[in-house]
Image (cartoon, rainbow, N blue to C red):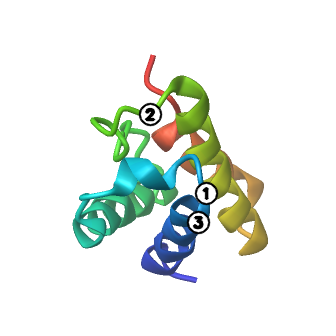
């Protein structure tokens, strides 16, 4: 599974979430997907630079955590190694 496949599944989960989907109204999902795909590819390659692709949407800390949990679920279902999943989680975690 490619990074873009993961992001497509991830975004479908977020869009289907009744609490999170209103935050995506008016958002260019193609542009968001491209940004998230680049960030995920970097994270899986070991680049630990933070990538807050969700910044500016007004998500609460709990909502942001749920978005990241969706990513972890997609990566886990794709049977990625635990180390890669942890790298991705760190890259997209809630900014301090």
Q: For the residues labelled 2 and 3, say whether their Cβ atoms are less than 8 Å apart.
A: no
**Rounded to the nearest whole Å, what is the CA distance between mark 2 and mark 3?**
16 Å
Query: Which mark, residue 74?
Result: none
Q: Residue at x 22, y 66 (%)?
A: 31
Secondary structure under tag 3 reads: helix
Secondary structure under tag 2 reads: loop
Q: Quadrant of residue 78?
A: bottom right
Q: Nearer the viewer, residue 51 or 57?
A: 57
- Circle 2 residue: 59
**Rounded to the nearest whole Å, what is the CA distance between mark 3 and mark 1?**
4 Å
| Place of residue 63 in the rendered image (x, y in percent of width and height, measured from the top left) | 57, 36
Mark 2 and mark 3 lie on one chain; the one further toward the N terminus is 3
| Place of residue 46 in the rendered image (x, y in percent of width and height, measured from the top left) | 47, 50
Single out the residue that lies furthest toward the top: 96
Label 2 environment density (alpha carbons within 10 Å; few <14, some 14–19, many ≥20): some
Q: Is residue 96 left or right of residue 67?
A: left
* Above or below for 88 versus 50: below
- Circle 1 residue: 17
Mark 1 and mark 2 lie on one chain; the one further toward the N terminus is 1
Q: Residue at x 56, y 74 (%)?
A: 9
Q: Residue at x 50, y 59 (%)?
A: 44
* Above or below for 36 versus 88: below
Q: Is residue 49 left or right of residue 56?
A: right
- Circle 3 residue: 16
Q: For the residues labelled 3 and 1, say whether their Cβ atoms are less than 8 Å apart.
A: yes
Which of the image's four quarters has the C terminus?
Answer: top left
């Amino acid at each position: 599974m490619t990074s873009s496949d993961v992001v497509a599944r991830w975004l479908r989960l977020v869009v289907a979430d009744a609490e999170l989907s209103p935050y995506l109204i008016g958002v260019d999902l193609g542009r968001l997907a491209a940004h998230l795909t680049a960030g995920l590819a970097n994270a899986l390659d070991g680049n630990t630079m933070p990538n807050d692709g969700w910044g500016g949407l007004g998500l609460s800390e709990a909502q942001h955590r749920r978005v990241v949990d969706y990513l972890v679920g997609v990566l886990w279902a794709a049977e990625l190694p635990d180390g890669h999943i942890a790298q991705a989680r760190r890259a997209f975690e809630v900014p301090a």
